[in-house]
Image (cartoon, helix red, strand yellow):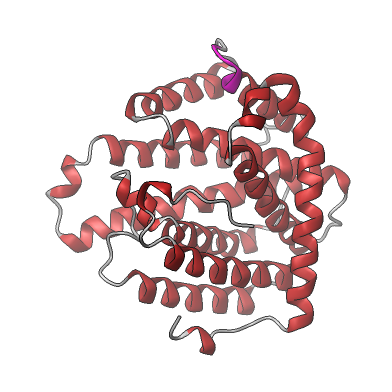
């Protein structure tokens, strides 16, 4: 892609470390998750690429979790690796209710998840819901989820998901806005959904994560969502999912500028150390692979749901 050459790039040794970590964390994520899936929703194992995509998201969350833990001043031990994998699986299954079963299922998920957050339970109706509840319960059991910061972050993430679904199911009010205002709404929605997610993850792993770094993790989360949406551009368009990155006039240039600005902020604002380097190298690797995904899937349409390691 034109313009990538002038971006900050991790050195070859750090990139090799990131590749090695990804392989290790992919294996560990499966060790944590496969027994749970086998016990509560074994059909997922036979569902084509869906199980592999869940493992990939859990691997991504483990990589980000490792960086956040070290930025927060702690060691990324086995317990934190397990929590990161659980968080990734929880995000994957929750997103599947929103994205993969139609508008009615998305609306119902939001209503039932709000019931879970406000009352602590909902009636489980099928194995997919059972797996989601089991994973969420195990994750919530690792920390005091009534801690004000963590509780606020969890509910803020839910509100961002709700807004995303509302935009999709009732797009009429977006159409009456000027183009710039419409794009701002879509951009903020994408930023908040992933920004709150990385905040929740960091607070699970490091209770009392330093406040002075929260806005920088938010920046990293926003970049991850923009990168994701660019990689999924053609699949989203095929399924009539409107995102910020598939509505801007030149998405490649928009992403490149956001990535350059965001990584510069992270380099200057985060404390020097292994955590910062892991986060920046992960973002670079993710950026490059999703640019390639965007290119490869330009003509794949409905079939652009490939698993990318």
Quadrant location, the C terminus: bottom right
- Residue at 31%, 51% (x, y): give it: 237
Front-most of 237 and 220?
237
* Magenta residues, dominant SS class: helix
Front-most of 60 and 55?
55
How many numbered marks are there?
0
Instruction: Give how far across and how far down residue 16 sits, in percent.
Output: 77, 74
- Residue at 45%, 80% (x, y): give it: 1
Residue 160 falls left or right of residue 212 = left
Q: Residue furthest left?
A: 176
Q: Residue furthest bottom?
A: 6
Q: Is residue 295 above or below residue 306?
A: below
Residue 94 falls left or right of residue 297 = right
Write down the region rendered in magenta: 125-129
Q: Quadrant of residue 32?
A: top right
Q: Is residue 189 above or below residue 261?
A: above
- Residue at 33%, 58% (x, y): give it: 244
Q: Quadrant of residue 133?
A: top right
Instruction: Give how far across and how far down residue 142 sits, in percent.
Output: 78, 33
Instruction: Give how far across and how far down residue 27 sits, in percent.
Output: 80, 48
Instruction: Give how far across and how far down residue 254 sits, in percent.
Output: 37, 72
Q: Is residue 37 above or below residue 209?
A: above
Residue 272 visible (yes or no) = no
Residue 82 visible (yes or no) = yes
- Is 10 magenta? The answer is no
- Residue at 36%, 30% (x, y): give it: 102
């Amino acid at each position: 892609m034109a313009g990538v050459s002038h971006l900050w790039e991790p050195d070859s040794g750090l990139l090799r470390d990131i590749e090695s970590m990804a392989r290790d964390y992919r294996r560990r994520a499966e060790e944590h998750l496969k027994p749970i899936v086998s016990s509560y929703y074994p059909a997922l194992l036979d569902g084509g690429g869906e199980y592999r995509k869940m493992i990939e998201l859990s691997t991504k969350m483990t990589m980000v979790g490792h960086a956040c833990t070290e930025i927060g001043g702690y060691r990324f031990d086995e317990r934190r690796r397990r929590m990161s994998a659980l968080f990734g699986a929880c995000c994957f299954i929750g997103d599947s209710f929103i994205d993969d079963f139609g508008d009615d299922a998305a609306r119902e998920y939001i209503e039932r998840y709000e019931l879970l957050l406000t009352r602590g339970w909902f009636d489980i109706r099928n194995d997919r819901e059972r797996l989601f509840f089991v994973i969420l319960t195990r994750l919530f059991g690792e920390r005091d989820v009534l801690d004000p910061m963590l509780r606020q972050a969890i509910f803020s993430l839910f509100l961002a998901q709700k807004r995303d679904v509302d935009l999709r199911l009732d797009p009429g009010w977006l159409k009456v806005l000027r183009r710039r205002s419409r794009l701002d709404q879509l951009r903020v929605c994408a930023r908040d959904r992933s920004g709150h997610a990385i905040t929740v993850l960091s607070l699970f792993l490091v209770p009392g994560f330093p406040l002075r770094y929260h806005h920088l993790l938010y920046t990293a989360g926003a970049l991850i969502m923009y990168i994701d949406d660019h990689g999924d551009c053609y699949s989203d368009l095929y399924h009539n999912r409107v995102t910020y990155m598939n509505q801007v006039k030149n998405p490649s240039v928009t992403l490149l500028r956001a990535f350059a600005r965001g990584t510069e902020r992270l380099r200057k604002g985060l404390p020097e150390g292994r955590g910062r380097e892991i986060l920046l190298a992960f973002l670079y690797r993710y950026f490059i692979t999703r640019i390639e995904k965007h290119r490869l899937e330009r003509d794949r349409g409905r079939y652009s749901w490939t698993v990318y390691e």
